[in-house]
Image (cartoon, grey):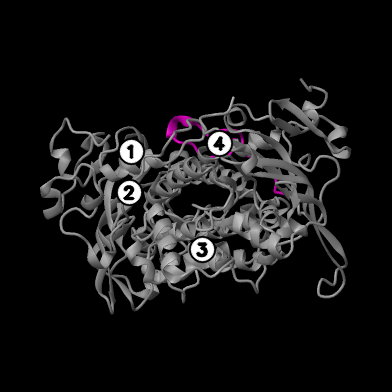
Amino acid sequence: MDPGLTPPRDQAALQLRAERLTRHFTFGGGLMARGAGTVRALSEVDFELTAGQTLAIVGESGCGKSTLARLVLNLDRPTAGRVLLNGEDIHAARGRALRRFRRQVQAVFQDPWASLNPRMRVRDLVAEPLDMQHRLPRSEREERVAQVLQRVGIDPARMHAYPHEFSGGQRQRIAIASALISDPKLIVLDEPVSALDVSIRSQVMNLFRDLQEERGIAFLLIAHDLATTAFLAHRIAVMYLGRIVELGPTEQMVAAPAHPYTRSLFGAALPAHPDAGPGAPPLSGEIPSPLAQPPGCAFHTRCPARIGPVCDTQRPVPTKVGAGWSVECHLHAGTEP
Amino acid sequence: MAAGGDSTVLKVRGLRVEIASAAGVIHPVDDISLDLRAGETLGLVGESGSGKSMTGLALLRLLPRPAARIVAGRIELDGTDLVPLSEGAMRRIRGRRIAMILQDPQASLNPAFTIGNQLFEALRAGDRSPRQGLRARAAGLLRLLGLPAPEERLQAYPHQLSGGMRQRVVGAIALASDPQVIVADEPTTALDLTIQAQYLALLEDIQKRTGVAILFITHDFGVVARLCHRVAVMYAGRIVEQGDVRDIFDRPSHPYTAALIRSVPSLTARAARLPAIAGQPPPLSALPAGCSFAPRCAHAQPRCLAQAPPELPGRGGAENRHVARCWRLEDPSWTPD
């Protein structure tokens, strides 16, 4: 059962698929005089996302979530695997197909200071995705800008102002307006509320929910705050050292996480009330360097539920533990329902 | 010991900080009073620009000069008022009897010296003890802060450690001279979730062992729920509510506190919409007359817009040191829920 969400109105409108998506960075000699190495930033990631849905990617620094976002946005190319948007490989797109991709897929980033050019007027910032494709008559262009500004709660009369004349929360709304103007099918939200104050954060999170309901936009949400994630996402993918270790429906996963890392991560979430207790005992140790990934299950060096040698030597395969719910862990191997 | 015979180690009364700028004179800290007892953690909560960090800096007399200065009030550390002290006298107290931990450990560590060197310096500043035994004590502190292989870490430079480890080193330096009070300004905001959980558990443990009083500056009510005994909520330079952590969560008595707590999403109870606070905090250079929160307040009455409210007993009772600045509390049956 899907938790409290809008049914996708038009399944055919969007299908994003990542297949065995992999990005390894190799370096050697040169400045890094200690020799060559490979950073396995992202390894064999599979997921699917359809219209009206939000998939959240959660994990700690270095888990690969930003690399994943860059690949989906076509800002970087995979070393193996592919991303399909409605059946077409996005990294093979050229010319008109690439422009269509840029129109259909937009992004909102964490820091609204950094993502808005301070020398451009709000009007031109918001219209940028439109200008990339075709020149609209000035009146029509301003009309479209006014519409999206209105929608995100910014007075359209202020479209001639500069970004510094707005507060952090308003700037993030302007960034959202710009992402909306080309009528995208998918928006990658990279930590979209982390930089906002608590009282502003809930306003912006409600706006995302409303926009999705109205327009059937799909969101790929990159976040480290779990409560934000649980509020916005229908499904959650938990990443550890470049791999998705668990992917499933939000409510079931929050209630009963299957992977020991998911359990520790959710257990480290801060309580909503002083009587809620400290959650799961904190994980010991630190995340291993992605340069020197442990063999077997990447989490075995910190795992509180390690079974035995199998965890140290053999990589677990994805196992289905429920509808649309899979986990990579030896604890669940052979329990396929 | 401090006046009153209780274990109050830090007593702040009527503290006021002034910044004179081209835009006029503002008071980022305005008439702040608070008490901190040994072994107690007081959470100073607020959004950006509320004055919480400025308050922390003022307590250590570290305000950016010449722009900002203390113009009124007392800061009594164990009975000694710090406000009139000379810089030389202050230097003998700062880092020894009252220490600070900042959000960014990078800013507190010198990149050119080893961790050991920086710890030795802090240890020697504490008691001018001879060099012998310094090494063992430094390693002991790192062990107390949960760093693996502490003897080896003494030779390391800051850049060779992860963010979480660096923040532990900063904690070790702050604890080196066995201070009575630590002011911690968002020390876990830059850390990953599982590392944050480790760090908070560690602080709690160290406090139990040493009895150090902690002023924990944060924007996050989750941290407050996890760690704090007492809470002071700041808005536009003032403390609008102060009380025991359970009173703040269960009987919030200022509409701002109540709305903030409601607007934080919960991991387990997935709401359809988040209750949001309309508008944004006022600029300090143009504070409204009366209560600063009144223009955003759902409970405001004509008097709130005209006259600043005094401190009144909160719903947890004056005997529990629960107070709030809200006119509506004059009516004992009123609640901000």
Q: State left or right for residue A116 relative to residue B251.
A: right
Which numbered disc, 2 or 1, marks the residue that appears first in the sequence?
2
Residue B167 picture location, percent across and down: 58, 57
Residue at 37 percent of width and 55 percent of height: A150
**Distance of mark 2 from mark 1, alpha carbons?**
9 Å
Residue at 84 percent of width and 59 percent of height: A38
Residue at 50 percent of width and 58 percent of height: A181
Residue A241 higher or lower than B336, as above or below: below
Which quadrant holds residue B112? bottom right
> What amino acid type is highlighted by mark number 3?
Gly
Residue B134 picture location, percent across and down: 64, 62
Which quadrant holds residue B16? bottom left
Residue B231 higher or lower than A72, as above or below: above
Dot 3, crowdedness within 10 Å: few (<14), some or many (≥20)?
Answer: some
The label shown at residue A9 is 4
Task: Please check whether the numbered discs 3 and 1 fall on a single chain.
Answer: yes
- CB under 8 Å between discs 2 and 1: yes
**Where does label 1 land, which residue?**
B248
Segment tinted magenta in the rendering = A267-287
The label shown at residue B126 is 3
| Numbered disc in front, either 1 or 4 | 4
